[in-house]
Amino acid sequence: MIWHLFFQPFIEFGFMRRALVVCLALSVSTTALGVFLLLRRMSLMGDALSHAILPGVAAGYLLNGMSLLAMSVGGFIAGMVVALVAGWVSRRTPLKEDASFAGFYLGSLALGVTLVSLRGSSVDLLHLLFGSILAVDNDAALFVAGVASLTLVVLALGYRGLVSEAFDSAFLQVNAPRVPGMFHGLFLALLVLNLVAGFQVLGTLMAVGVMMLPAVAARCWARTLPGLLLLAAAIGAVCAWLGLSLSWSAGLPAGPSIVLTASIIFFFSILFGTRSGLAHSLRTLLT
């Protein structure tokens, strides 16, 4: 039973193996970015940017159909424009960055859905919003693998700067005024690029779940940053494997199954994590 549920689909079917490899690549790269978002207390920025790329994706779809290159370039440009404009607005107006992001991403989501509806059908819209991970082709798999590899290399080279900017940006601002902006821009570019890669397989609405849920769950257990990064990647990989297995055995959509699996691990971590221990706190209150 265990063999049939967790191993046989990936051994017998090539599309299942391809889906698993793509999800594992995303788990390694996006969860690391999710950890840095968590440390910056910007956990919802990933959700905002995942909606912000939709107009660019829709524009690429209108111009060139379901072209991987056109939709990826359009999504990256749209995401970067929204991120930079929202940051500029927050610096020039009394609005906080989260408020400006909220305004721009809601408008972007509505614009993207409107653009898709001009030419596409409800099936095309569902594909863009929720992905089709079991239909990933070799080009999309290579694109996701390339983005994941580039992300890991950049994170390794800029690790010290990203950590310093996340924990003490004020110190960097005083001693090296240009450094925080440079690392912040680099981080935003990696974030948008990974969301663009994620939408290819999970859609714009599900990609952020793979990014944030394993990171938040790992935060309930790990006490050091290296441990947090490794544990988040491991949780993301396990969620990908279990979610795909669940979707195969129960006939459920693959992307939502992966995110639901991550949500279950998230709730378990909240209750029993060594750094959260909500269940222990509840027992203490009851006694």
Image (cartoon, grey):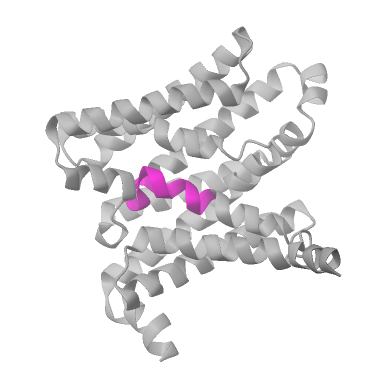
Q: What secondary structure is the magenta-colored segment mainly?
A: helix
Q: Is residue 263 left or right of residue 142?
A: right
- Expressed as whole percent of the image width and height from the top left, the position of residue 180 reads 69, 24
- Nearest the viewer among 155 and 62 is 62
The residue shown at (52%, 25%) is: 101
Q: Is residue 7 visible?
A: no
- Expressed as whole percent of the image width and height from the top left, the position of residue 34 reads 59, 46
Residue interval drawn in magenta: 198-211
- Nearest the viewer among 261 and 154 is 261
The residue shown at (72%, 35%) is: 166
How many marks can you see? Answer: 0
- Expressed as whole percent of the image width and height from the top left, the position of residue 87 reads 57, 19
Q: Is residue 9 left or right of residue 153?
A: left
Q: Is residue 242 magenta?
A: no
Find residue 158 and report its image quarter.
top right
Establish if 60 lies above or below 142: above
Q: Is residue 19 left or right of residue 279?
A: left
The residue shown at (28%, 36%) is: 71
- Nearest the viewer among 178 and 245 is 245
Establish if 87 lies above or below 59: above
Q: Is residue 107 visible?
A: yes
